[in-house]
């Protein structure tokens, strides 16, 4: 097995998840231009939640690329056609994390996507009904809360973006 928090091949990540009965999580980077990413912030109800990217757990029987599109729609209201581009997969090094395997995906949004908006989370999990503030920020000065892996796939994103 690869070192923790190192990029590992997609199929290996899925096999490790199955072998250890770990839940997989998909994190989604959305760009309109190569120099920006979409971030979400919780309202004042959740002051410690920080700045994140759309993300969520893979449901039983669901393919990770489908999870990426579903979570994006649930958390942002964006219904992008895809396909979601797989950037990399990682083993998350924290033992107490419910999702130890993380898959990072990228989707491009139309240039007409607003700079900022709010969205109430849909879906069936514990986030349902939460209000998120969404905005595009600099990919370099994103303000993502450190220590949760939100930024771990940004190097793979930079490598995948057109120059």
Image (spheres, helix red, strand yellow):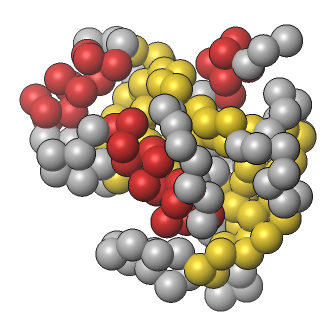
Is 66 situated above or below 124? Answer: above
Q: Which residue is nearer to you in this view: 71 or 41?
A: 71
127 left or right of 156 in image: left
Q: Is residue 23 visible?
A: no
- Measuring 29% from the left and 23% from the top, which residue is drawn there? 13
Q: Position of residue 35 (x, y in %)?
A: 88, 31
Picture quadrant of residue 94: top left
Q: Is residue 28 visible?
A: yes
Picture quadrant of residue 161: top right
- Measuring 84% from the left and 33% from the top, which residue is drawn there? 33
Q: Which residue is nearer to you in this view: 42 or 114?
A: 114
Is 37 situated above or below 87? Answer: below
Q: How many marks are shown on the rendered structure?
A: 0
- Measuring 59% from the left and 33% from the top, which residue is drawn there? 106
Q: Position of residue 47 (x, y in %)?
A: 69, 78
Q: Quadrant of the N terminus?
A: top left
157 left or right of 67 in image: right
Q: Quadrant of the C terminus?
A: top right
Is 64 situated above or below 55? Answer: above
Q: Position of residue 64 (x, y in %)?
A: 34, 38
């Amino acid at each position: 097995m690869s070192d923790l928090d190192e990029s590992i091949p997609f199929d290996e990540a899925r096999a490790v998840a199955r072998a250890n009965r770990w839940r997989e999580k998909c994190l989604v980077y959305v760009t309109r231009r190569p120099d920006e990413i979409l971030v979400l912030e919780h309202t004042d109800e959740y002051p410690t939640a920080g700045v994140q990217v759309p993300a969520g757990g893979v449901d039983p029987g669901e393919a990770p690329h489908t999870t990426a599109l579903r979570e994006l729609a649930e958390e942002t209201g964006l219904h992008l056609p895809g396909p979601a581009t797989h950037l990399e997969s990682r083993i998350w090094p924290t033992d107490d994390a419910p999702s130890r395997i993380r898959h990072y995906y990228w989707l491009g949004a139309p240039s007409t996507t607003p700079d900022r908006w709010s969205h109430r989370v849909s879906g069936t999990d514990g986030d349902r009904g939460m209000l998120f503030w969404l905005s595009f920020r600099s990919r370099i000065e994103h303000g993502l809360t450190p220590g949760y892996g939100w930024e771990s796939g940004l190097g793979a994103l930079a490598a995948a973006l057109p120059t």
